[in-house]
Amino acid sequence: MKISIVTPCLNNVEHLQAALESVLQQPGPTEYIIADRGSVDGSLDVIKRYESRLASWTTEPDGAEYEALNRAFAASTGEIIGWLPATDIYLPWTLQVAREIFTKFPDVSWIGAGHKTCINVSGSFAEMQRAAGFSRRAFWAGKHGGRENRSWIQPEVCFWRRSLWDKIGGVVPSKYHHGTDFHLWSLMWDHAPLTSVEVPLAGFRFQLDHRITDSIYLNDVDHILEQGPVNTEAPSYHREMHVIEPTFDVDPEAGASQTYALNVYATDEFIDESDDLENSVAQKDAVIKVLDDANKDLRAQVEAQRANIQGTIDAHQTKIDELEGRLRILRYTHPGYLFKSAMKLLGRGKSKDKAKTEAIK
């Protein structure tokens, strides 16, 4: 079973080689197609170094990503199709797992990893995020990407059959220049459920995800969700969650062998429960922040009152010091004080004269 992988590229020289290597090192028949969009940063030099190992590659100054994708998809011939962004990487077992699943489950048309493996810019592990599951109802409710929920369906972990690709017209429509992937998923949901695979399938460079702050992308997503599905009649799998899990059979003589099991859940309530849990955590964090801010405000008020009280004390102390100074002045200049001082001095003088007289005698 041949798998066709397409990678659109625009000035991704820093990470392009890692993406290429992650595909070309996969076992099994693989057709790899690069669609460059007019890179000027050295990406073309990287592509040319791997030219002999690629099925094909092109470079054209495209206006949008969907144009490059359509060039690459049109050149592909594999029974299975995948889309790897130039900033991401496949894991060593990715295509083998995809090939085994599509071979074992002929009714499965579209798969996506239930685990999102995030890597940082340098390529080292950053974190693992797990999706609660996938369903058509949840997608159109905005639970698989949107302004309120960032659990996006990632292109690097998705693979689909050519038969599904043909059902949606065999092209990525040009209606949305930025929400290309989200639009593609919206079309696929009308023809097949997205089956979650409980195996990490790709490394996503988390810090390069500009969708969470790109208002243009979110505007496209908002419009897609507002428009709703093309097929307004809900299919039988509308609320189903399809999940494939790896299983291990242990034979004392043959050793452990791995296979896969497909589970179909009739309801997607688990997605709602997971989302409610995330909302509960967010609400808890919001309450903690409010209390923390209130505590900070209270501390600030106490400190301000303490400063005012200290200022009042300092002002009163200044007045006390001033009054004591005046009292000392009055004491030293009062006639009675001066008379007593004079008498003391006179008495001290008489005592000295008497002592001298006694000494002469």
Image (cartoon, grey):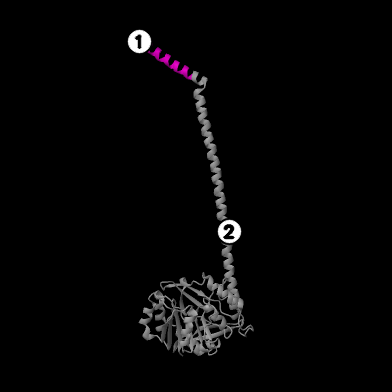
Check the image and report above or below for 334 versus 138: above
Q: Secondary structure at mark 1?
A: helix
Coordinates of residue 279 in the picture (x, y in percent): 59, 69
Q: Earlier in the sequence, mark 1 or mark 2?
A: 2
Q: Quadrant of residue 24?
A: bottom left
Q: Measuring from the top left, give residue 119's x and y in whole percent.
A: 44, 73
Q: Main secondary structure of the magenta part?
A: helix
> Where's residue 308, x and y in %?
55, 44
Residue furthest to the top? 361
158 above or below 324? below
Residue 313 vs 113, above or below: the answer is: above
Q: Nearer the viewer, residue 43 or 278?
A: 43
Q: Is residue 115 something one can see in this rendering?
A: yes
Q: Identify the element where label 2 is drawn.
A: helix
Residue 291: numbered disc: 2
Q: Image quadrant of residue 123?
A: bottom left
Question: Tag 2: Cα neighbours inside 10 Å, few (<14), some, or many (≥20)?
Answer: few
Residue 251 is at least partly visible in this image = no
Left or right for 89, reference 231: left
Q: Nearer the viewer, mark 1 or mark 2?
A: 2
Residue 292 spot, x, y in % from top left: 56, 58
Residue at left offset 59%, top offset 81%: 136
Q: How far is disc 1 from disc 2 in space, using C-alphas?
A: 93 Å
Foreground pick, 247 / 27: 27
Residue range corresponding to the magenta coloring: 340-361
Residues 241 and 13: in front is: 13
**Label of residue 360 in the image:** 1
Tell me if residue 356 is in the magenta stretch: yes
